[in-house]
Image: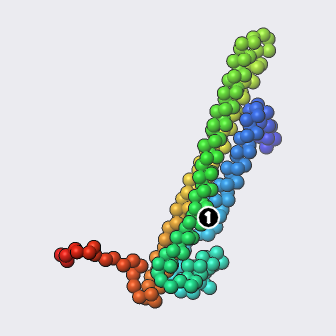
Amino acid sequence: MNAFVQELLHAWSTGGWVMIALAVLGVIIYGTAAYLVVNLYHRRITRISDADMRRWVGDPANAPGEFRELIRYTQDEVRSLEDIEGRFREIESSKVSEVDRRITFLNVMVVGAPLFGLLGTVLGMLLTFKAIGIGGGSASEIVSKGISEALVATQTGMMVAIPGLIAAYIAKILRNEFVSFLARLETITLRHFRPQFHGMTRVFTKPTGQKPS
């Protein structure tokens, strides 16, 4: 354990000031990813059966807390199936759009990590070339430091980006599952209220002047 900590401290001191930027970026990436994954996964929407949703739509009091409020919002004071559809569009625009914004932000931060690593590589190589140009007895030590800074920064940038990329992919899967859940819930809600509102969701009419086949 002590050897691992010492190795981390050595890498931190060797990588230069770029390591501070990568550390901040890592905190932002993993914090955003953790929020997305935890917020989406704890709902366990993939385990909700159609029978459960039909029971919740029939009596929203049977639904868990978060879903109870959502279902009640789609049913309160609606006068037509179009009203129900409009409520679900509002939910999608608020809930799903927020998740999409966070996933986009996460992807941007993930892309930034290797770029900071590349910046550290450039700075390290500049230090190396400077040492070569100066020459002298201390040149070899400066060259070694420059190469180490270049390699450590690149390695750290990749180590920050790769887990973040995996987390973004998982968040995208959970986001799609949430969208699928809303679609299932909307279908079941429309089926439940269709007899009450006497009709289909949309009315299809033939163009004027078209003769029947």
Image coords of residue 57 (percent x, y): 54, 83
Which residue is painted at 51% across and 78% down in the image? 84
Please identify the quadrant where the C terminus is shown: bottom left
Residue, far front: 209
Q: How many marks?
A: 1
Between 89 and 55, the residue placed more toward the observer is: 89
209 sits to left or right of 116: left
Q: Is residue 132 above or below residue 74?
A: above
Q: Amino acid at mark 1?
A: Leu
The x, y position of residue 202, in whole percent, is: 39, 77
**Residue 184 can be seen, yes or no:** yes
* Left or right position of 64 against 199: right
Residue at the image point whose x is 54% and y is 59% from the top: 173
Q: Identify which residue is drawn at 64% across, 33% down.
A: 118
As helix, strand or loop, the secondary structure at mark 1 comes to helix
Q: Is residue 194 above or below residue 37?
A: below
Left or right side of 6 for 185: left
- Name which residue lies at 68% across and 23% down: 125
| Image side of residue 132 versus residue 181, left or right | right
> What colour scheme governs how the chains and residues are painted in the rendered image of this protein?
rainbow
Residue 1 or residue 205, whichever sits in front = 205
Q: Is residue 87 above or below residue 179?
A: below
Mark 1, residue position: 40
Percent of width and height locating residue 86: 51, 74
Residue 3 seen in the current view: no
Give the vertical position of 77 relative to 32 (above or below). Answer: below
- Can you say which quadrant of the picture contains the N terminus? top right
Q: Looking at the image, which is closer to me, 180 or 196? A: 196
Q: Residues within 10 Å of mark 1 (few under 14, many from 20)?
A: some
